[in-house]
Image: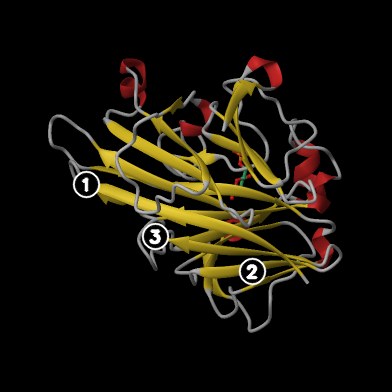
Amino acid sequence: VEICKGINGLEKVILREVRSSAEVYLYGGHVTSWKNDHGEELLFVSSKAQFKPPKAIRGGIPICFPQFGGQGNLEQHGFARNKIWSIESDPPPFPTVNSNKAFVDLILKPTEDDIKTWPHSYEFRLRITLGPGGDLMLTSRIRNTNTDGKPFTFTFAYHTYFSVSDISEVRVEGLETIDYLDNLQNRERFTEQGDAITFEGEVDKVYVSTPTKIAILDHEKKRTFVLRKDGLPDAVVWNPWDKKAKAMADFGDDEYKHMLSFQLLQRPAGSTKGSPVQLKKDSILSGAISCTECMS
Ligand code: BG6
């Protein structure tokens, strides 16, 4: 584990395992790079991404907390992706501890100013691990530390952007027959048909109560990303396609062809309205993902 200055002087942590590596910016607690043992980048980061607070970094794995999306009172996807996280040298034990792996522990706690925006005290611990086989794992533990004993409600997500060779050649397996809310159709609820999902245009769907294992197959690269998750029932599949891509200042016009955003989301399973999770004082909610790259 190495700490150094990244783009615009923002601090980043580099994790290395044999020949694979990952990079994590303290700004946002944001994974911006995950490379396999051939040095190939597996995450998408826009060439126009601004590494400039308070703008969130476009690509990698933004952490959305305490609100996912734009439906609550806070800014879109909450504020955690716009804060500088700290490295925690002596964290309490995580359920997934494995001392043979490269990992870093980050923590986010509210400042007095933050409490004016969201009146709750919390500890958000994030462990980012690179396994010996090059797997990338993120484990979050969110704890309610409100001194008045009050519960709080929130949603949280890993807003993962995967790098793909050509979105038209990508298939997602594991979401067949699952219900989804279509963000492009007033969050109306539909059921996915029996086949693997393919992409021919803009998509922004929230799949509810998804299986713990989902695969993203990149036909051209002969690469499969296998996602395993724990405690994150919903999954958002998003690609802005050409028109929306052009409207985003920090996203290249044609870059939509080379990314698939697959977001793992915490909220009650089967919820149709996306009602947030309630967390009691001193309770902890965890959510983990592991991403594995396999070649076929
Ligand atoms: C996705 C949403 O989660 O995030 C999309 O479903 C949204 O609607 C996208 O456009 C990107 O959001 P942002 O705030 O990072 O531009």
Question: Residue 81, how many percent across, how many down?
Answer: 52, 33
Question: Mark 2: which amino acid?
Answer: Ala
Q: Secondary structure at mark 1?
A: loop
The response on whether ligand 1 sits within 8 Å of label 2 is no
Q: Is residue 186 visible?
A: no
Identity of the residue furthest to the left in this view: 148
Question: Mark 3: which amino acid?
Answer: Gly
Q: Reply above or below: 9 against 158.
A: above
N-terminal label among 1 and 2? 2
Q: Secondary structure at mark 3?
A: loop
Q: Residue at x 64, y 20 (%)?
A: 52
Quadrant of res 45: top right
Q: Reply above or below: 17 against 115.
A: below
Distance CA(mark 1)–CA(mark 3) = 15 Å
Quadrant of res 126: top left
Question: Mark 1: which amino acid?
Answer: Ser
Quarter the C terminus occupies: bottom right
Q: Which residue is mark 1?
A: 283
Q: Which residue is mark 3?
A: 231
